[in-house]
Image: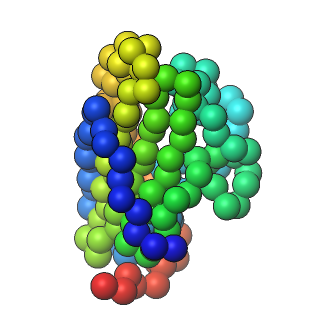
Amino acid sequence: MASVSLPRADYTDRFGTTSEGVHTAEAWARAAFEPASATDSKQLVWRRVLQLRLGPVDDPERVAGWEVVENTASRVVLTADSWHLTGTLVFEAEPTGASVTTRVTYRRPAGRLVWSAVGPVHRRAVPQILAAARARLERRPVDPPIDR
């Protein structure tokens, strides 16, 4: 899958974590968001509050319902749209850890309004989600090294 250019964003943040093991970007994304269920708090926010049009949570071609638009060992890009905003998540894996960048593009004024309410919760939750992903991954066998 070729590298995609990221869309313009009205909001961007980036959070990172360290890890003792080397894992692919997809492994980080799946550890952060899966297993997912319809009652998972992240799914409820994404589907009900942000109204993102996500696919089935158990679709192996997606990550927790998010469309995968780029997938390399070192970077996976996930995207989802709603009527008022577009969300893009970029997981990047490195030999010493990983980062996730959130990019939100407002499609209508309501997008800015909704994100102004969700953003503070998002900024508190993402470091915790990454820490939980790290804990899950460090209990699993290490993925093959990342080719650079």
Q: Which residue is pictured at 38% across the width and 27% down the height? A: 106
Give the residue at x 70% y 61%: 60
Q: Where is residue 50 in the image (x, y as percent from the top left)?
A: 52, 24
The image quadrant that residue 38 belongs to is top right
Instruction: Give left or right: position of 57 versus 92.
Output: right
Q: Would you say residue 86 is visible in this rendering?
A: yes
- Locate residue 132, reporting x and y percent: 44, 48
Q: Which colour scheme is used?
A: rainbow
Q: Pick the residue in front: 26 or 72.
A: 72
- The answer to whether residue 132 is left or right of residue 37 is left
Q: Identify the residue at image location x=61%, y=21%.
A: 48
Rendered position, 76 above or below 41: below
Q: Residue at x 26, y 53 (%)?
A: 16
Query: Does any portion of residue 121 appear in the rendered image?
Result: no
User: Could you say where residue 83 lies in the image, as x and y percent from the top left?
Assistant: 55, 25
Q: Residue 23's quadrant in the figure? A: bottom left
Which quadrant does the C terminus fall into?
bottom left
* Number of callouts: 0
**Quadrant in the picture for residue 28:** bottom left
Q: Is residue 23 above or below residue 116?
A: below
| Nearer-the-camera pick, 59 or 22 | 59
